[in-house]
Amino acid sequence: MSAAESLAVQATTPGRGLTLDSPLVLKAIAGVVLLVLWEGVVRLWAPAYVARPTGIARVFVGVMTNAQFLADAGATLGAVALGLAISLVGGTAVGFAMGRVAPVEWGLRYYVNSLFATPMVAILPLLALWFGYNGDTRLAVVIFASFFSIAINAADGARSVPIEFLEVARSFRARPLATLADVVVPASLPYLIAGVRLGAGRALVGAVVAEFFVSIPGLGYYILYHSRTFRHDEAFVGVIVLVAAGVAFDALTRWLTRRYLPWHRRQ
Amino acid sequence: MNQAPARFRRVTIAASLVLGAIIWQVAGWYTSNAFWAPLSATLASLAEVVRTGVLLRQAVSSFELYLAGLVVAVAVGAPLGLLLARVRWLRVALEDYILMLYATPMVALIPFILSIMGFGFAPKMLVVFLFAVFPVLYNTIEGARSVRPELVEVAKSFRSGEWRLWCDVLIPYTLPFTMTGVRQAIARGLVGMVAAEFFLSPSGLGQMIMMGSQNFDTAGMLAAILIIVLRGVGRMDLGRHLEGRFARWRSYSP
């Protein structure tokens, strides 16, 4: 970190000019080059409605302060958050049961694994039939998309609790519930977090796909509507918000892991 | 805990599968046909599409799309990842942007692809490609970043040329990581395939599911979903096998 900072300082000191091998300058140059390439390619070869950086920049503030857009974004991200929370509770319970109780694992293994491998898009029409063409379907898709990655990772985590930990707990005559709360859960938290991060990405995709399919207000439908009416610049602002939400959630889980789970790094 | 006799384990697994089949069947009897179809009806519908050759034709069409996108993704992702591994300034410049694209929900780009490229095979292939390429690229870069400097130094001190360095050090070291990426790409590509078949021009297994849902032919839809689930499981096993095969020389200690 300090090396990067000193490089950044070095890069901005006058006289010597920019040192090309400092990471921040390189990244900034690459970013500018990519944007110019995008702009140039679109201007030269693509139809006028195709999104390009200057067009996006022009509409960005307008879209981001539009009450309708904010309501759409809130609806999508809210559904993702709620679905993830439900998956986290349910998936953890199922996963821990599978990880610690062998018959549960045998009974559920094929179902959980094959549903995990199922692309959630494939069952979308079925869920739309069950839950109707409204927000419930989106919530169901989000839960379906994230539940199994959380359950599988929770099961892996619960299975990999070091046997010594459990023996120590037993020799101190810890009750099963106390063993679960004080040994199994903390030891498998890193796995659980990995599952949540994986599940969050899938949940975001699930919410967008559900909105495409059932046409309910939200970020995905906003993108679909505006690209159909050839307003790609506006539509792309929706993509930016989606990416930002994904990246922000990832950064948050990383930070929480580092801050509150210091034993994570030892593995 | 894991000392239970193997027979008990096998009985439990078999019982759970039988129970699942029974629930599927009974749920079909007691709900509206539009919501759920009994297992027997689903299997009958499956037999029907197998007999008429519809399944084979649609599955081949889906598989062509999937394979084309996946092959191009690996053919682009792996060499590009290796190049970025060797050329340090290029990697430093681009890796954050690649990570960002890796985190982008690619489905959100489908409407753009539809209105720019229209219908046809190429836009659908592009969707599968976009879903699959970034895991390969990202994992290859991660792997190449962790090549031990000692290995390169030893090769250099034996006056190894650039070509030998690639063949004997960089590629073998990075390949297991690439395979992790390929395993993820195999799963994500399948999502991309179905999404492309749904939202671009309908074709393949995606079209079968769509048609089933539009005609309230729930048995037909469940049959197509069942095929996709089985293919997903098969590909997950294939991916794990690939990863395991190449991971063998990853876990050596210096």
Image (cartoon, coloured by chain):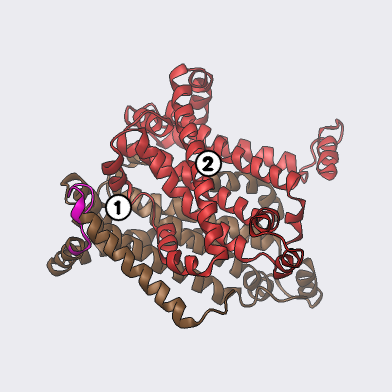
Chain colours: A red, B brown
Image vertical order of residue A13 relative to residue B11, above or below: above
Q: Nearer the viewer, residue A75 or B14?
A: B14
Pointer 1: what residue? B121
Residue A52 counted in the magenta span: no
Question: Which residues are drawn in magenta?
Answer: B29-40
> What residue lies at 86% left-to-right and 40% top-to-bottom?
A6
Q: Which residue is mark 2?
A: A85
Q: Residue at x 46, y 55 (%)?
A: B132
Is residue A54 depicted above or below B136 in this figure? above
**x then y, percent, for residue A212:** 34, 37
Q: Position of residue B102 (x, y in %)?
A: 54, 48
Local secondary structure at mark 2: helix
The quadrant where residue B80 appears: bottom right
Is A238 left, or right, of B57 in this rendering?
right
Amino acid carrying label 2: it is Ala
Q: Label 1 to label 2, Cα distance in Å?
A: 39 Å
Vertical position of residue B101 compared to residue A74: above or below: below
**Residue A43, how many percent across, how many down?**
45, 32
Q: Chain of mark 1?
A: B
Q: Position of residue B71 (x, y in %)?
A: 43, 63
Front residue of this view, candidates A187 and A66: A187
Quarter of the image with the N terminus of chain A is top right
How many numbered discs? Answer: 2
Q: Can residue A34 be spotted in the picture? A: yes
Query: From this viewpoint, is residue B136 visible?
Result: no
